[in-house]
Amino acid sequence: MTTTQVILLNGGSSSGKTGIVRCLQAVLPDPWLAFGVDSFVEALPAKLHDSADGITFAPDGGVHVGPAFAALDAAWTTGIAAMAHAGARVIVDDVFLGGPASRHRWERALHGLAVLWVGVHCAPATATAREIARGDRVQGMAASQAHVVHQGLTYDVEVDTTHTESLTCAETIAARVG
């Protein structure tokens, strides 16, 4: 069995990816670094928020990114891949708004590494309830992303957080880590 070097979780907003990542870090025997798209967005300069060049959030929860965002996202992806190529074990949580194209950018960056691709599903109503409870998301984002982020994609393992706790999902994923 090939030793997994990267675990990449894809799921819509408020699907439970971050909780699963924390649980994975706790249950996996070796240390794993964790990086999430939310941290990347928070790291952007303020002038790229609500900017056509950066990232905008539509009132219906839609997300639009511009060229400066795309360039920084490519650098972020390459940087995370470089850490994995250097020997760090890495968990990434992302939202593949571009479906297969989003995955392909990671596949290019992670070429040569053993990657476990994970689909994190959550019913739109459950994700919406979490989104409201969080209070830090544009309402509608969770419902609009719940299914679209998985269209055209296949995974090594899939979990559904609608009725399953993060720890149980993490244990399912950890059982597939080589």
Image: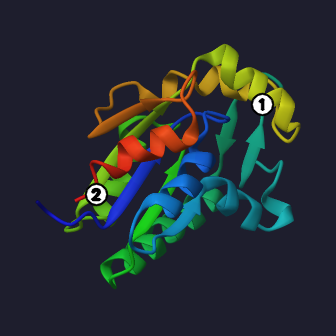
Q: Which mark is residue 165?
A: none
Rate crowding at label 2 as few (under 14), some (14 to 19) or many (20 or more) other CA atoms within 10 Å.
Answer: many
Q: Quadrant of the C terminus?
A: bottom left
Quadrant in the picture for residue 12: top right
The amino acid sitting under disc 1 is Glu
Q: Which mark is residue 131?
A: 1
The amino acid sitting under disc 2 is Val
Residue 81 appears at what percent x and percent y? 39, 71
Q: Which mark is residue 115?
A: 2
Q: Nearer the viewer, residue 140 or 155?
A: 155
Q: Which colour scheme is used?
A: rainbow
Q: Which of 87 and 32 is in front in this view?
A: 32
Upstream in sequence: badge 1 or badge 2 = 2
Residue placed furthest toward the left: 1
Residue 51 appears at what percent x and percent y? 80, 51
> Left or right: where does residue 37 sit relative to residue 58?
left
**Image point (68%, 27%), residue name:** 142
Q: Quadrant of the N terminus?
A: bottom left
Q: Is mark 1 on a helix, strand or loop?
A: helix
Quadrant in the picture for residue 90: bottom left
